[in-house]
Image: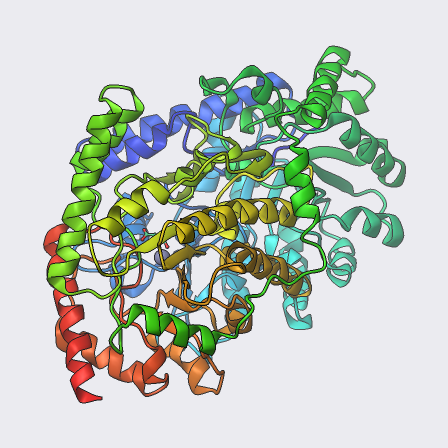
Amino acid sequence: MASHIVGYPRMGPKRELKFALESFWDGKSTADELQKVAVDLRSSIWKQMADTGIRYIPSNTFSYYDQVLDATAMLGAVPDRYGWAGGEIGFDTYFSMARGNASVPAMEMTKWFDTNYHFIVPELGPSTKFSYASHKAVSEYKEAKLLGFDTVPVLVGPVTYLLLSKPAKGVEKTFPLLSLLGSILPIYKEVISELKAAGASWIQFDEPTLVKDLDSQQLEAFRKAYTELGSSLTGLSVLIETYFADVPAATYKAITSLKVVTGFGFDLVRGSKTLDLIKSVGFPSGKYLFAGVVDGRNIWANDLTVSLSTLQALESIVGKDKLVVSTSASLLHTAVDLVNETKLDDEIKSWLAFAAQKVVEVNALAKALAGQKDEAFFSANAAAQASRKSSPRVTNAEVQKAAAALKGSDHRRATNVSARLDAQQKKLNLPILPTTTIGSFPQTIELRRVRREYKANKISEEDYVNSIKAEINKVVKLQEELDIDVLVHGEPERNDMVEYFGEQLSGFAFTVNGWVQSYGSRCVKPPIIYGDVSRPKAMTVFWSSLAQSMTSRPMKGMLTGPVTILNWSFVRNDQPRFETCYQIALAIKKEVEDLEAAGISVIQIDEAALREGLPLRKSEEAFYLDWAVHSFRITNCGVKDTTQIHTHMCYSNFNDIIHSIIDMDADVITIENSRSDEKLLSVFREGVKYGAGIGPGVYDIHSPRIPSAEEIADRIRKMLAVLETNILWVNPDCGLKTRKYPEVKPALTNLVAAAKLLRTEL
Ligand code: GLN
Ligand code: ZN
């Protein structure tokens, strides 16, 4: 019976690793104590998989921070600034690279493909010296072996490693990263030979870049790498694991002809074309197919009957003893164990599978293929699938009808943006270079306490409303004193910009422990969208009207947009993502209309995560951007010309999607920008015409540093060199909720002073 798991979450079912790491970083516990927690987590994972019956159990998928950083440590590719003196890399150097230390900042972090996991980007250049400097892969293999588990050690593959790296400072534009292949392969060989000596029989190379659009040179690097590793690999079975999408046809042909590879792992959930490829191109005889049928990216129970028939079809192509049942990707991207969900009802729980349950599903499928089908397990699964299909909690006919009726229309506002801006200006009467903030103000400990106690029924609704009201009043008065032009209420009633709306919309469920690692010790707990989404009643009108009543200046209504709600949730897999997004858009549209009717004339609809949903392959980008942008327009196409729609986006990397951003047709957009001024502005310098209001952030809210008025004024001058005076707004990069008042007050004072100074210069 052949079953395999690509990788497993490291944090532990109750985020044990998070707390151990943070306590160690705070100097409250020792390295030994941290290692003890890690040892226990690893052994319990191996034991669970072995007890379940998994044949190919991964090792070295644990990490104290990140698996790409682990590979950097293995290769000894420590940037000079960390002052590493050689030898085995310890916690000091490792965590300095991850998090920075008193004198040196951390290495850059970026998103791992299209997931919400972030890895530490290797920095490589002509002077990088490689050496075998972390024996983690081998010691984890041995650790498991001592416990009685013969595991498959997992390494980030050499080509993926290089393709995810960035050229070191000084050689940014010129350095060909793939030229380092010859320098890193000798170290991979050392690791391989130690693993062989320790008794390993399989090795897994994670090469997810194989699902991207690769040029011939990149593809050639794969061929070169595995040919070159060839002789060192004799005696080992080699698995090349791909995930997150299907492998393009040319890549499929190239890699399946690699002689040295014994098995190929494919994502059959997101990789919708893989099956056809295997059927039409064929599969090399004598090789293993690791069929990723259990979704590693979601929390839904597998439809075992469907998976079994897929597997049977594959079996007839690759042969009975050559098919291995697997997960579509590492389970790192799903929640850990459903057992700890005490607040979900049984019906919803029966529809779900977290990592621990997915291991059981993989095993059940493998057993069924081998003729030992667990009938009870399969029929319970079939019953759960049927209940999910027919549950009235999932289907809302009215919502379905409304979403279907959207077809065939673009949902654009009736008037063009310049006419709208004129109408709005007549009503709002704002100065040039108007100032505003992005929404949240500092979230104090006291505020968190009030929200927590209200949720736990420890304080009355009246007390809660009074506390929040007092906080809003404080924030409004502060903004008036600072002389900000368009105010916000500060979002004191919100814990999180998605959860706050999810909790008030139908079709959402929330977990207690459904944490997923985002980076290092940081985890997020995405809501689960299980049914048609609707809005039973107004969500923000009460607070926004209250805030507006406290001031004569315009008060922004503050909403999270549909694409961001979608991209930061676990999304249902029984209908296309765009359909769910349209449903959320219709719910937000109702809120926009209610805010407008309540007299709110500026409404901000945040789309912080729009860019995150971009597919991995160029060929699929246009389709995504089209429905994502359409969803945004649906929310506000019906408002009056005089109602000003703002949107906000995090991250500054927009140049490639600027036309989609323009197509959103918001009246004003505020964008994170301060960490890369030139990049954002260059797109306008190159001639892109932008007629709507735009506020590229003038200072970085991620840092406690207080910017001076001159510095902000300089920034604005640079923007004015590229953008028309009458469209430029002045605002920080993002919300202020993670900052403290002693930082926010002087920073905003300087921001307003800079705007006023510039007004006199124009
Ligand atoms: N309105 C939100 C805030 O100010 C936006 C946060 C975000 O873009 N991530 O906190
Ligand atoms: Zn933001």
Q: Nearer the viewer, residue 64 or 527?
A: 527
Looking at the rendered image, the quarter that the C terminus falls into is: bottom left
Looking at the rendered image, the quarter that the N terminus falls into is: top right
Q: Residue at x 68, y 34 (%)?
A: 397
Q: Nearer the viewer, residue 61 or 145?
A: 61
The colour scheme used here is rainbow
Q: Residue at x 20, y 51 (%)?
A: 739
In the rendered structure, the answer to whether residue 407 lies left or right of residue 25 reads right
Residue 249 drawn above or below residue 40: below
Q: Nearer the viewer, residue 256 or 362?
A: 362
Q: Nearer the viewer, residue 559 or 742?
A: 559
Residue 305 drawn above or below residue 270: above
Residue 73 lies, in percent from the top left, at 39, 51
Residue 269 lies, in percent from the top left, at 69, 42
Residue 386 lies, in percent from the top left, at 73, 22
Residue 84 drawn above or below residue 587: below
Question: Is residue 247 at least partly visible in the picture?
Answer: yes
In the displayed orientation, state which residue is furthest to the top: 376
Residue 286's quadrant in the figure? top right
